[in-house]
Amino acid sequence: MLFAAECRFVYAAQRLDQLPPAMGPEVAFAGRSNVGKSSLLNALTGRRALARVSGEPGRTRQLNFFDLGGRLTLVDMPGYGYARAGKAVKQDWQGMMFDYLRGRATLRRVLLLLDARIEAKEADAAVMDLLDRAAVTFQLVLTKSDDVKPVALARKTEEAVALARAHPAAHPDVVVTSSESGEGIEALRAAIATLAA
């Protein structure tokens, strides 16, 4: 089983020219600042502190690469849409994020995380459009589902499915997750495992 393998941090890149050589298939975690990328990575790998979790949005400022059992590389991306980041910083790391998404031949899928508690934002729509244009397959993952009442969560899931249908690069399956309760973690592991070498 893929996620029973050791997962270890291997590389961090702050600029495109620092990207490590491709070691095989990659799955990237993208989303707005504070959507729960690091928490989800930790939940998937069963490691409490593989990816650093911060209460302060915009803390991840680089692409962090994690080797999963030599069969897959997980990439924790900087969050986008963080209002308080300085303009130059924002352009810098968001520019690198988009360049990585466009130009990485080994990138198998982007898991695009959306917070189940709030509406999808303009920045989310812009990233989906970019992924469509770059022809990079992405899959919507709702996070923090434990914080949403069942009726609201069902409505939110329907909205996400409709969003996915509207984008040619989107994978049709939406995964609902909670790093706290463990909801959807096994389903997401199974989806990711199909992409491993």
Image (cartoon, rainbow, N blue to C red):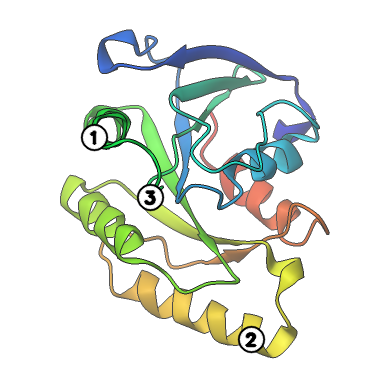
- Say above or below: 90 vs 21: below
| Sequence order check, earlier mark of 3 and 1 | 3
Q: Position of residue 107 (x, y in %)?
A: 37, 33
Q: Of 64 and 35, which appears nearest the observer?
A: 35
Q: Which mark is residue 83?
A: 3
Q: Which mark is residue 30?
A: none
Residue at 60% x, 71% y is 117
In space, the residues marked 3 and 1 are separated at their CA atoms by 12 Å
Circles 2, 1 touching at the beta carbon (< 8 Å) = no
Asked whether the viewer can see residue 1, the reply is no
Crowding at label 3, few (<14), some or many (≥20) Cα neighbours within 10 Å? few
Q: Of 97 and 133, which appears nearest the observer?
A: 97
Q: Quadrant of residue 99?
A: top left
Instruction: Label 3: state its secondary structure.
Output: loop
Q: Which mark is residue 152?
A: 2
Query: Label 1 belongs to which residue?
Result: 91
Asked whether the viewer can see residue 109, the reply is yes
Q: Quadrant of residue 172?
A: bottom left
Disc 2 residue type? Ala
In space, the residues marked 3 and 2 are separated at their CA atoms by 27 Å
- Say above or below: 94 vs 186: above
| Sequence order check, earlier mark of 2 and 1 | 1
Residue at 55% x, 80% y is 156
| Sequence order check, earlier mark of 3 and 2 | 3
User: Which part of the image, by quadrant, shows the N terminus?
Assistant: top right
In space, the residues marked 2 and 1 are separated at their CA atoms by 34 Å
Residue at 76% x, 27% y is 49
Q: How many marks?
A: 3
